[in-house]
Amino acid sequence: MPRALPYLLLLPASLFLLVFFFYPFGLVVVESLTRGGEWTTENFTRMTGHWKFAPAFWNTIWLTAIVVPVQLIMALTMASVVQKLKTGRSGLLYIFAIPLGISDLAAGLIWLAIFEQSGFLNSIFHAFGIIDRPTLYLGYQNMWVIFLAVVLAEIWRATAIMMVIIVAGMGLIPKEYSEAAEVFGASRWQRFTRVTLPLLRPSLQTALILRILMAFEVFAVVMALGGTTLPVLMGETFQWQFQLQDRGVAAAYAMVILGLSVAFSLVVLRLLHVPKGARI
Amino acid sequence: MTDTSPPPAPQLEARRAGRFLFYAGIALLVLWVLVPIWFLFVNALSAPSEVTGFPKRIWPSFDLASIQFFLQFQGVTQALWNSVKVAVLTMILSIAMGAPAGYALSRFDFPGKEFFRVLVIMTRAFPLPLLALPLAVMFIRTGLDDTVLGLALVHAMLALPFAVLITFSLFSGIPVELEEAAWTLGCNRLQAFIKVVLPLALPGIMASAVFAFVISWNEVFAAAVLTIENRTLTAFLLQSLNVSPLPLKFAGGAALVMPALIFIFAVRKYLFAMWGIANR
């Protein structure tokens, strides 16, 4: 009995993973490669042939490329600031962590309140006498404003998760390392780049992977701010599944998102590789 | 920090300027997080005519008409209730399956342990909401489509990896010796677990349950794909985005944000401890 016990304890979770992860995962693959029961790449050619595919793909990539580095820097800043603080630490941490609990849809709506035509941005401009009539920002004529609003909303919403992971990671680094560096005359900046950052690699790995995945899944923020004006991969997946009722193409989109996610996860793992013996 | 002699005047000045910058930076970051939420609540707590009016005031008029309009809108209370039901079910499912697995991983050494761990971590490299696409078909076959349980199963798949990793770290933090002492005092494995380990782990388990609740409460894509009649609040808001009036959107956004604020506050102490070890 004792030998079987760990397997018994793992059984429910394993079965669940099998049924709700591996099985549907296989189904998406099959669905993307078949049409009417025949093996074909037609779903993919249909997908890439549609005019919205290229913009959706590049919008998603650009969003990720802009949002993630900014978030990394902000999260590191927040974490370092909190680390230095003597009083009010937990209060500040709570405030910084708030967006973690806020959904992407809510974040989209929050920034909609700022950017929409009668929104707060226009009101503030009005108060300063810059404009006298509200301008429409989130229209298709102002694609880049929608893009900017999405970038801001994403940065606002998802920096928290990186911050939490990094703060947790910093808490695990023994103080002695930094103190030793200080004794040897390292400046604050040197201590940060030469001691803290390298020791933080495992946490940075987790933070970056999670965050990049979330960035490829960007969806509700975009829907709230721009509807379908600004195409992104996840939004197109939703459109093909729902509006166009074409599960094959939706699955093909899913495969693209999946491919991107796996590729970038591997890149991050490789870049921030931590040898097993070097972990704290 | 440990200076004993007073520094010369210019250095003192530089330090004072540095400190001013430091606190100004903190204030900016706090405003960056809080002001957008404030704007959302101003909108939610103002009369509909003010929400669509221009220019806006920075203070809400505390007119509950928007909230009333939101609550009386057809389908809203149902959607709210569905969100709660799905989130509670997700919480129960993910903890019921994740906690035993976490316990097994932390207490036993057995062949296949590493494999299971890698498996769980691997799921993080996939955009899980996409699994909803093929599951939609499977659910139609099994009669799970458009049910609270069906959606909760998918959300549990999202929350399960976190539940496993978090409970794993929780149980690892409780010394085995405590359990062993209980065995020598005549408890069997189950009794020792219930009387010694569980009370110690319970607050942390509650925290990870809350985390699962938030994951489910916020999820948009799977909810929108899998439900039509039994929509959750996020799915309801998403699908009515381009037809619903602004007051409805903002009141809905506020309804989405409220629980998040409370839950993050409730688990703030555990948030960082949970992530510290879940990284490994």
Image (spheres, coloured by chain):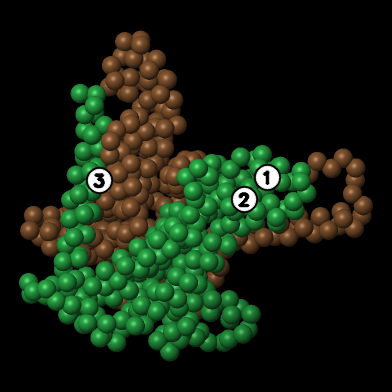
Chain colours: A green, B brown
Same subunit, labels 3 and 2: the answer reads no
- Report the residue marked by disc 1: A178
Q: Residues within 10 Å of mark 1 (few under 14, many from 20)?
A: some
Instruction: Give whichever of A219, B253 is nearer the camera.
Output: A219
Quarter of the image that includes the C terminus of chain A? top right
Q: In the image, A171: left or right of B204?
A: right
State the SS at label 1.
helix
State the SS at label 2.
helix
Q: CA distance from mark 3 to mark 2?
A: 41 Å
Q: Give the chain of mark 1.
A: A
The mark lying in front, picked from 3 and 2, is 2
Q: Is residue A132 above or below residue B189?
A: below
Q: Position of residue A148 (x, y in %)?
A: 49, 77
Q: In the image, B15: left or right of A126?
A: right
Q: Position of residue B42 (x, y in %)?
A: 49, 64
Q: Is residue A162 above or below residue B106?
A: below
Write the residue at 84% across / 42% down.
B3
Do the numbered discs 3 and 2 sit on residues whose CB atoms are within 8 Å? no
Same subunit, labels 1 and 2: the answer reads yes
- Report the residue marked by disc 2: A196
Q: Give the chain of mark 2.
A: A
Q: Position of residue B248 (x, y in %)?
A: 35, 68
- Report the residue marked by disc 3: B89
Q: CA distance from mark 3 to mark 1?
A: 45 Å
